[in-house]
Protein backbone atom coordinates (compact mmCIF):
# COMPACT_ATOMS: atom_id res chain seq x y z
CA UNK A 1 0.00 0.00 0.00
CA UNK A 2 1.38 3.37 -0.99
CA UNK A 3 1.56 6.24 1.50
CA UNK A 4 -1.20 8.29 -0.18
CA UNK A 5 -3.56 5.27 0.11
CA UNK A 6 -2.70 4.93 3.81
CA UNK A 7 -3.51 8.61 4.32
CA UNK A 8 -6.83 8.12 2.51
CA UNK A 9 -7.71 5.09 4.64
CA UNK A 10 -6.92 6.96 7.85
CA UNK A 11 -8.91 10.02 6.78
CA UNK A 12 -11.98 7.94 5.90
CA UNK A 13 -11.68 5.99 9.15
CA UNK A 14 -11.60 9.24 11.13
CA UNK A 15 -14.68 10.47 9.26
CA UNK A 16 -16.60 7.27 10.00
CA UNK A 17 -15.70 7.37 13.68
CA UNK A 18 -16.49 11.07 14.02
CA UNK A 19 -20.00 10.85 12.59
CA UNK A 20 -20.81 7.53 14.28
CA UNK A 21 -21.08 5.58 11.02
CA UNK A 22 -18.90 2.91 12.62
CA UNK A 23 -19.44 2.14 16.30
CA UNK A 24 -17.02 0.08 18.38
CA UNK A 25 -18.47 -1.69 21.43
CA UNK A 26 -16.34 -4.66 22.51
CA UNK A 27 -17.90 -4.83 25.99
CA UNK A 28 -21.53 -4.70 24.80
CA UNK A 29 -21.44 -6.41 21.39
CA UNK A 30 -23.94 -6.05 18.62
CA UNK A 31 -25.95 -8.95 17.21
CA UNK A 32 -25.60 -9.19 13.45
CA UNK A 33 -28.35 -10.58 11.21
CA UNK A 34 -26.49 -13.90 11.14
CA UNK A 35 -26.91 -14.22 14.90
CA UNK A 36 -23.24 -13.71 15.53
CA UNK A 37 -22.03 -11.23 18.10
CA UNK A 38 -19.58 -8.56 16.97
CA UNK A 39 -17.89 -5.59 18.64
CA UNK A 40 -18.46 -3.36 15.64
CA UNK A 41 -21.46 -2.05 13.73
CA UNK A 42 -21.31 -0.03 10.53
CA UNK A 43 -24.04 2.21 9.12
CA UNK A 44 -22.50 4.13 6.25
CA UNK A 45 -25.87 5.64 5.35
CA UNK A 46 -24.98 8.28 7.91
CA UNK A 47 -22.37 9.59 5.47
CA UNK A 48 -25.22 10.99 3.37
CA UNK A 49 -25.82 13.70 5.94
CA UNK A 50 -22.28 15.10 5.87
CA UNK A 51 -21.25 16.95 2.68
CA UNK A 52 -17.56 16.96 3.60
CA UNK A 53 -17.56 13.20 4.22
CA UNK A 54 -19.41 12.23 1.06
CA UNK A 55 -17.19 14.58 -0.96
CA UNK A 56 -14.04 12.93 0.42
CA UNK A 57 -15.51 9.50 -0.34
CA UNK A 58 -16.16 10.45 -3.98
CA UNK A 59 -12.66 11.91 -4.27
CA UNK A 60 -11.28 8.73 -2.66
CA UNK A 61 -13.03 6.48 -5.15
CA UNK A 62 -11.75 8.59 -8.04
CA UNK A 63 -8.19 8.48 -6.71
CA UNK A 64 -8.33 4.69 -6.29
CA UNK A 65 -9.48 4.32 -9.89
CA UNK A 66 -6.61 6.53 -11.02
CA UNK A 67 -4.03 4.73 -8.88
CA UNK A 68 -5.21 1.30 -10.03
CA UNK A 69 -5.62 2.38 -13.68
CA UNK A 70 -9.27 1.32 -13.67
CA UNK A 71 -11.20 2.56 -16.69
CA UNK A 72 -14.94 2.19 -17.13
CA UNK A 73 -17.92 3.37 -19.14
CA UNK A 74 -20.47 3.40 -16.33
CA UNK A 75 -20.60 3.63 -12.53
CA UNK A 76 -22.99 1.12 -10.95
CA UNK A 77 -24.34 1.39 -7.42
CA UNK A 78 -25.61 -1.45 -5.26
CA UNK A 79 -29.10 -1.02 -3.84
CA UNK A 80 -29.59 0.80 -1.72
CA UNK A 81 -26.66 2.27 0.17
CA UNK A 82 -24.27 2.25 -2.79
CA UNK A 83 -26.60 4.24 -5.03
CA UNK A 84 -25.95 7.81 -3.80
CA UNK A 85 -22.18 7.32 -3.69
CA UNK A 86 -22.27 5.91 -7.22
CA UNK A 87 -24.22 8.99 -8.31
CA UNK A 88 -21.70 11.39 -6.76
CA UNK A 89 -18.77 9.53 -8.31
CA UNK A 90 -20.48 9.37 -11.71
CA UNK A 91 -21.10 13.12 -11.53
CA UNK A 92 -17.47 13.76 -10.61
CA UNK A 93 -16.18 11.60 -13.46
CA UNK A 94 -18.84 12.71 -15.95
CA UNK A 95 -19.95 9.12 -16.58
CA UNK A 96 -23.33 7.41 -16.92
CA UNK A 97 -24.72 5.75 -13.82
CA UNK A 98 -26.89 2.73 -13.07
CA UNK A 99 -27.85 0.63 -10.08
CA UNK A 100 -28.68 -2.99 -9.37
CA UNK A 101 -31.63 -4.15 -7.29
CA UNK A 102 -31.32 -7.21 -5.05
CA UNK A 103 -33.97 -8.81 -7.27
CA UNK A 104 -35.98 -7.90 -10.33
CA UNK A 105 -39.09 -5.75 -9.92
CA UNK A 106 -42.29 -7.71 -9.81
CA UNK A 107 -44.19 -5.19 -11.92
CA UNK A 108 -43.65 -2.85 -14.85
CA UNK A 109 -40.67 -3.88 -16.99
CA UNK A 110 -39.35 -6.28 -14.30
CA UNK A 111 -35.98 -4.56 -14.34
CA UNK A 112 -33.22 -5.55 -11.96
CA UNK A 113 -30.77 -3.03 -13.44
CA UNK A 114 -31.93 0.59 -13.62
CA UNK A 115 -30.24 3.48 -15.43
CA UNK A 116 -27.82 3.30 -18.33
CA UNK A 117 -25.68 0.16 -18.46
CA UNK A 118 -25.52 -0.90 -22.12
CA UNK A 119 -24.41 -4.31 -23.34
CA UNK A 120 -20.62 -4.41 -23.55
CA UNK A 121 -20.08 -1.56 -21.11
CA UNK A 122 -17.20 -1.69 -18.64
CA UNK A 123 -18.46 -0.97 -15.13
CA UNK A 124 -17.16 -0.12 -11.69
CA UNK A 125 -19.51 -1.18 -8.90
CA UNK A 126 -19.83 1.02 -5.81
CA UNK A 127 -20.67 -0.57 -2.46
CA UNK A 128 -20.90 1.05 0.96
CA UNK A 129 -19.76 -1.88 3.12
CA UNK A 130 -18.17 -5.30 2.66
CA UNK A 131 -18.79 -7.86 5.39
CA UNK A 132 -18.97 -11.40 4.00
CA UNK A 133 -18.76 -10.23 0.39
CA UNK A 134 -21.83 -12.25 -0.58
CA UNK A 135 -24.19 -9.34 -1.26
CA UNK A 136 -21.46 -7.37 -3.04
CA UNK A 137 -20.60 -10.20 -5.43
CA UNK A 138 -24.28 -11.08 -5.94
CA UNK A 139 -24.63 -8.13 -8.33
CA UNK A 140 -22.09 -9.63 -10.71
CA UNK A 141 -24.48 -12.25 -12.13
CA UNK A 142 -27.26 -9.89 -13.26
CA UNK A 143 -24.69 -7.48 -14.66
CA UNK A 144 -22.97 -10.28 -16.59
CA UNK A 145 -26.33 -11.47 -17.92
CA UNK A 146 -26.92 -7.92 -19.17
CA UNK A 147 -23.56 -7.97 -20.95
CA UNK A 148 -21.91 -5.54 -18.51
CA UNK A 149 -18.24 -6.22 -17.74
CA UNK A 150 -17.36 -5.39 -14.13
CA UNK A 151 -13.78 -4.14 -13.84
CA UNK A 152 -13.74 -3.79 -10.04
CA UNK A 153 -15.86 -3.30 -6.94
CA UNK A 154 -15.08 -0.27 -4.80
CA UNK A 155 -16.35 0.04 -1.23
CA UNK A 156 -16.13 2.65 1.50
CA UNK A 157 -15.28 0.20 4.28
CA UNK A 158 -14.50 -3.47 4.83
CA UNK A 159 -14.35 -5.52 8.00
CA UNK A 160 -11.51 -7.40 6.31
CA UNK A 161 -12.91 -10.85 7.05
CA UNK A 162 -11.38 -13.91 5.32
CA UNK A 163 -14.80 -15.02 4.10
CA UNK A 164 -15.00 -11.85 2.01
CA UNK A 165 -11.54 -12.47 0.56
CA UNK A 166 -12.70 -15.92 -0.52
CA UNK A 167 -15.91 -14.54 -2.05
CA UNK A 168 -14.07 -12.02 -4.21
CA UNK A 169 -11.39 -14.54 -5.18
CA UNK A 170 -14.11 -16.94 -6.33
CA UNK A 171 -15.85 -14.17 -8.26
CA UNK A 172 -12.62 -13.17 -9.97
CA UNK A 173 -13.27 -9.44 -9.53
CA UNK A 174 -10.89 -7.18 -7.58
CA UNK A 175 -12.10 -5.31 -4.50
CA UNK A 176 -10.67 -1.92 -3.51
CA UNK A 177 -11.79 -0.23 -0.30
CA UNK A 178 -11.19 3.23 1.06
CA UNK A 179 -10.69 2.05 4.62
CA UNK A 180 -10.80 -1.09 6.75
CA UNK A 181 -11.32 -2.42 10.26
CA UNK A 182 -7.59 -2.61 11.12
CA UNK A 183 -7.08 1.03 10.11
CA UNK A 184 -10.20 2.08 11.97
CA UNK A 185 -9.19 0.55 15.30
CA UNK A 186 -5.71 2.02 14.85
CA UNK A 187 -7.28 5.47 14.49
CA UNK A 188 -9.62 4.87 17.44
CA UNK A 189 -6.67 3.78 19.56
CA UNK A 190 -4.64 6.80 18.43
CA UNK A 191 -7.44 9.10 19.57
CA UNK A 192 -7.36 7.57 23.06
CA UNK A 193 -10.95 6.37 22.91
CA UNK A 194 -10.05 2.70 23.51
CA UNK A 195 -8.63 1.03 26.59
CA UNK A 196 -5.99 -1.68 26.17
CA UNK A 197 -8.58 -4.34 27.06
CA UNK A 198 -10.99 -3.01 24.46
CA UNK A 199 -8.27 -2.92 21.83
CA UNK A 200 -7.25 -6.49 22.66
CA UNK A 201 -10.86 -7.63 22.34
CA UNK A 202 -11.29 -5.90 18.97
CA UNK A 203 -8.11 -7.51 17.65
CA UNK A 204 -9.27 -10.91 18.95
CA UNK A 205 -12.53 -10.53 17.03
CA UNK A 206 -10.67 -9.57 13.87
CA UNK A 207 -8.44 -12.65 14.14
CA UNK A 208 -11.32 -15.07 14.74
CA UNK A 209 -14.87 -13.61 14.60
CA UNK A 210 -16.57 -17.00 15.01
CA UNK A 211 -14.69 -17.90 18.17
CA UNK A 212 -15.11 -14.40 19.61
CA UNK A 213 -18.88 -14.65 19.13
CA UNK A 214 -19.17 -18.20 20.45
CA UNK A 215 -17.20 -17.31 23.56
CA UNK A 216 -19.84 -14.70 24.35
CA UNK A 217 -22.90 -16.83 23.65
CA UNK A 218 -23.47 -15.93 20.03
CA UNK A 219 -23.66 -18.19 16.99
Image: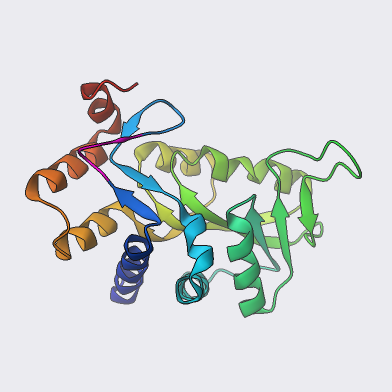
**Left or right of 155 on screen, residue 78:** right
Image location (x, y in percent) of residue 39: 28, 40
Q: In the rendered image of this protein, does residue 4 appear above or below residue 133?
A: below
**Pick the front one: 219 or 71:** 219
What stretch of residues is rendered in magenta?
A: 25-30
Q: Position of residue 154 (x, y in %)?
A: 51, 59
In the image, what residue occupies the spot 26% across and 53% down? 182
Q: Is residue 218 magenta?
A: no
Q: Residue at x 36, y 72 (%)?
A: 8
* Quadrant of image for the N terminus: bottom left
Compared across the picture, whether 93 is left or right of 59 comes to right
User: Relative to residue 128, is residue 217 drawn left or right?
Assistant: left
Asked if residue 27 lies in the magenta stretch, the reply is: yes
Q: Position of residue 207 (x, y in %)?
A: 23, 38
- Report the number of numbered marks: 0
> What is the quadrant of the C terminus in the image?
top left
Q: Residue at x 76, y 43 (%)?
A: 145
**Residue 4, image x, y percentages:** 33, 76
Of helix, strand and loop, which mostly describes the magenta segment? Answer: loop
Q: Is there any visible trace of residue 66 in the rendered image?
A: no
User: To which quarter of the image does residue 97 belong?
Assistant: bottom right
Foreground of the two, 196 or 206:
196
Amino acid sequence: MTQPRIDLARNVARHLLRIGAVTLSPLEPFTWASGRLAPVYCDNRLTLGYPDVRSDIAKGFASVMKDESISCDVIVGTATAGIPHAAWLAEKMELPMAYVRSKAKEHGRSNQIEGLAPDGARAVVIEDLVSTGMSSTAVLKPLAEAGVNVQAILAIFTYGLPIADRAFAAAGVPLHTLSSFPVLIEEASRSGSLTSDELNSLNAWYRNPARWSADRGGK
